[in-house]
Amino acid sequence: MTHDVPRPSASAHPLLGIRWWPAGLGLGLAMAVVGFIRSQGDWPYQQRNLATMVTLLVAGGWLWLWWLGWSRAPKLWRYWGAGVAAVAVLMGASLFRIRGVSGDLMPILEPRWARAAPAGTGIAPDPGAAARKEDVVEAAAGPDFPQFFGPNRDGVLQGPALDPDWAARPPQLIWRRPIGAGWSGFAIVGGVAVTQEQEDESELVTAYERTTGRRLWAHADLTRYRTTIAGEGPRATPTVVGDRVFTLGANGRLNCLTLAEGQLVWARQVTEDAGSEVPEWGYAGSPLYLEGRVIVSGGGREDRSLLAYDAVTGAVVWAGGSAPAGYSSPVAVELAGVRQVLSFNSRRISAHAPETGVVLWEYPWGAGHPHVALPVVVGTNRVVFSSGYGVGAELLEVRRESDGGWAAVRVWRSIRLKAKFANFTARGDFLYGLDDGVLACVALADGASRWKEGRYGHGQMLWVQDLLLLTAEGGEVVLLRPTPEGPGELHRFKVFGAKTWNPPALAGDWLVMRNDQEAAALRLALVTPGP
């Protein structure tokens, strides 16, 4: 005699009635797509991250819809599960906000109740500061760092002789203070360090005493730039010439101020002079001082792309070119025996005559991605450009033609150096720079990779004799001695705990650096002279 064993019913065992295979298929497909994306080494790192995030969001949406509509789970389970998931997402969005992104386009989250310290706080101002401002300007002897990327705007310093043994003589943190938002660096002249920052609805040019971090003065303009991805505040580093400070704000405000007091001498609105609009990520090019003129990239068409202003009066001296503005700073170079100003614009490189602004030659570049890194001259008539987002680097040879015109001809193109934010430099027969956040060495002869090692993120670099000071995106200062054989990392010193994109300034043994929340000054040990 046989007996039939009854099967468990779906109502008795609800889990057995759920249709699991669509969820498994969706998850498996998502993991396969993510694996494929991460394996694409030739894709820009940012593209891989964005594609990964989109895939995971689509997978999450699919799972939510599957559970709610196609899982065959009990109705109460489906409604409660979908509701809890939706509430969790809404609670996360209400408790946390995106505070910008990393250089690799990964979102940075912070609690919504977090409040940045006001920029004017920190070390309290000395009541006698006003009477001593001019003394501070003259107080500190030694080398200055008067503009973006150093005295020669090339990131290469001839001294001082830094002690490479940070294990025995580590950097000394002299002061640290809150500062307003922005991606500007410091310019240092004498005892004063000048930068730009955002405070509420005002864009500030601020001066701090180099040795104490005490604020000396602040000039305010009622303007504000802010986006979720790019952050807020001014981007360009001030340029100091004599007793004048020249600054370009994120929305195109060009100021000339006195170094001692911060008094306004003259101001211009670059967007009005150029007939242009503010670039997507704000104006970021630091003003170039050349032969009594202040040169900035305005991005206007009809021969108003690059503009030169009289440094004394602020009057427009000339304008030239018709390319939209990029995010690189104009730089004065000599190529083929002729002085010229290079402007790394959007989709185009332009070279201008410094006396008239006339375009000498142009070269097409990229597909609209941001161009930030300064060009590097590597010979009497050769110059290297590089940008991120998969574009890479090109070595151009600039020639004077028989008819008196100019031509720029590609010598090689390489994807082994993709300088997104960080400026790169040439040392001997090699280029050193951050290739999408990883330190790389590229042969100058053909653009071939010698090595690529060490993910430092999208920071900045300064060469000091044979040593490389690298401010990593995570807030560390890294000391290296790179050679064609390897990066030669020596030591690391943690300064900040947040994203650090701002360029550092080194004046003598004083390293002054900042990010969009804090500023700090360190003293670096120097090599002790022998007997």
Image (spheres, rainbow, N blue to C red):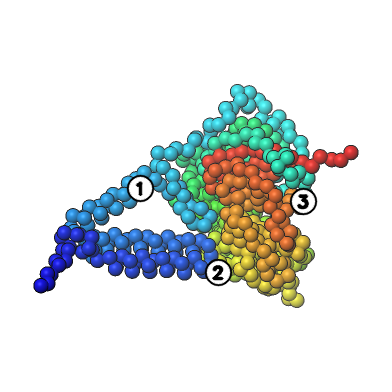
Tell me the residue at 63%/40% (across/down): 194
Give the Cα distance between marks 1 and 2.
34 Å
How many other residues sit within 10 Å of disc 2, few (<14), some (14-19) or many (≥20)?
few
Q: Amino acid at mark 1?
A: Gly
Residue at the disc numbered 1: 92
Q: Amino acid at mark 2?
A: Asp
Say whether disc 1 or disc 2 marks the residue closer to the N-terminus: 2
| Residue at the farthest left position | 1
Q: Amino acid at mark 3?
A: Gln
How many other residues sit within 10 Å of disc 1, few (<14), some (14-19) or many (≥20)?
few
Tell me the residue at 67%/27% (across/down): 132
| Residue at the farthest bottom position | 402
Secondary element at tag 3: loop
- Residue 316 in the image: x percent, y percent? 62, 52
Say whether disc 3 or disc 2 marks the residue closer to the N-terminus: 2
Residue at the disc numbered 3: 465
Comparing labels 1 and 3, the label whose residue is closer to the camera: 1
Q: Between residue 218 and residue 493, name the one nearer to us.
A: 493
Tell me: residue 151, above or below residue 445: above
- Residue 514 in the image: x percent, y percent? 59, 43
Q: Between residue 198 and residue 433, name the one nearer to us.
A: 433
| Residue at the farthest front position | 1
- Residue 232 in the image: x percent, y percent? 49, 47
Residue at the disc numbered 2: 42
Residue 170 seen = yes
How many other residues sit within 10 Å of disc 3, few (<14), some (14-19) or many (≥20)?
some
